[in-house]
Image (tube, helix red, strand yellow):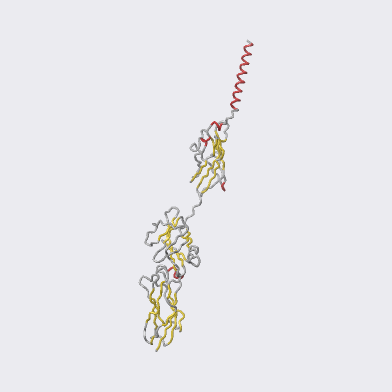
Amino acid sequence: MRNIIKLLRVGSAILFASTIVGCSSNDDDPVSIAEKIKIEEAKLSAFPLFGIPSTKVDIIDPEIVDNKEVKYGEINITVPSTTVLDNISALITSEELNLSKFSISPSNDVKLSYVEGKTNVYTIRNIIGGKEELLHYNVSITKEPIEVSETLKITSFTFEKSKNPSLPNDIEISRIVEGIGVDRIYLFVPAGTDFTNLIPTITYDGTKIYYYQDSSQRPGSTNNEYPAQGKSIDFKYPKSFILEVKDRNNEEFKTTSVIVDVVNPLIVETTSVIIPDTKEGSTEVYMIAKWINQGNHMLVYGKADAQENQDPDLGTNAIRVTRSLPSVGLVPGESADVKAGIASASFPRGTYKTTAVFYPRFRYNEEVDDLLEPARLNITAKIIE
C-alpha cells in the first residue's frame, strides 16, 4: 500500500513538472503578438474630432515592412479658421478602427492642445496579450486661412516703359472715378503716342480679370481673360477697353472702364492771329483759326471759354471769340472753326489785344475737366476810322 502511494506522488510530480515546462515554453515563444496579426488591419481610416467639423483630412499611413512599422504615419486635419486649437479630443469609433482588436491612445476623453503647430502622437495597440505598440500617427491640425473679402477693384494700371519703349517713362493712373455700376480709371500719355499698341500691367483685388472692347457687350458675358504678363491692346478711338474683376466663386464681378488720352487734347493750329482792321460802327466776324482734337476721345464744350491778358483792360471783352462744334462733338483728328470779331460800335478807335482760353472736355467724362490743359490763342484787333 505504501508503494502505491509513493508511485502516485511521483506521478503527480512528473505531471506537474511537465506542465511547468510546457507553460515556460509558451511564454518564451520568440514570435511576438504583432507577428501573429496583420498590423495593416490597425491602420486608421479617418480621424474625426469631438465637436469640431473638419474641412479636410489628409492621412499618410505608417510604413510597414515585414509586418513591422518602420515609419510613423501622418495625419493633418484642416478645420475652420475660427476654431480654437486647445482642449481638442478625438472621436475614434469602430468606423475608423477595429476596436475589437485594437485600442488607441490618447483615448477619446483626453483633451490635447494643437496651438502653434503642436503635433501629438497617437498610438495603436493590440488589446490582448502585452498590448504591444503596433502603429503610430503624428497628428496635427491646421486652420483654414481667413477668407478676406475681395473688393473686385483695379489696384494698379500701368504702362511700363519696359513694355512700352515708345513712352518716356512709366504711365500710371491719374484718377479713379467710382460709379454705381462702372468705375472709370484715367491715364494720360504724351501727345503723339500710338494708341493702337499699348501694353498695360494690371493688378487687382479679385480672383480673375477679364476684358472686352465692345462697349455694347453685356456686362459679365466676357470670357477673355487678361494675361498676367500683359497684352498689346488697341486703345484708339472709337474702341473701348473694359475690365471685369471676378470673385473666387465666379459669381460677382466689378466693371471698370479704362480711358487713355492726353492732357492737352484741344490745340489751336496757331498761337496768335491778327483780325483785319474793323471800321468804327461795323460788326464784322472773321474765321481766324481752327481748333483741333489731337486726343483720343470726342470733345465737347466744357467750362466756358474765357479771356485773359486784355489790353487795354476795360472790364469787358472788346474782342468776342467763339468756337464752333459739331452737334455730337469733335472726334479725334478733326477740327472746327474759331471765330472772332471786335465790337467796334461800343469801343473807340485803337488797338486791342486779348488771349482766348479754350477749355476741353471729354464727352461724358467731365470728372476730369480739371486734369486737362486748356489751349490759348493770342488775338490782336484794331478799330479804325
Is residue 121 positioned above or below 33 on the image? below
Quadrant showing the C terminus: bottom left
Q: Residue furthest front?
A: 165
Q: Quadrant of residue 232?
A: bottom left
Q: Measured from the top left, where is residue 270 in percent x and y?
A: 43, 77
* Residue lying at 50% horizontally and 48% vertically, measured from the top left: 80
Q: Quadrant of the N terminus?
A: top right
In this view, 89 is above or below 213? above
Q: Residue furthest bottom?
A: 385
Q: Position of residue 265 (x, y in %)?
A: 43, 71
Query: For this view, does 337 lie left or right of residue 88?
Result: left
Q: Residue 279: give x, y in percent of width and height.
A: 38, 87
Residue 233 relative to residue 40: left or right: left
Please determine whether, in this image, residue 101 is positioned above or below residue 209.
Answer: above
Residue at the outermost left position: 327
Quadrant in which residue 27 is drawn: top right
Percent x, y for residue 335? 39, 74
Q: Residue furthest top?
A: 1
Task: Note whether 344 is above or below 56 in the view shown.
Answer: below
Viewer-closest of 20 and 148: 20
Q: How many marks?
A: 0
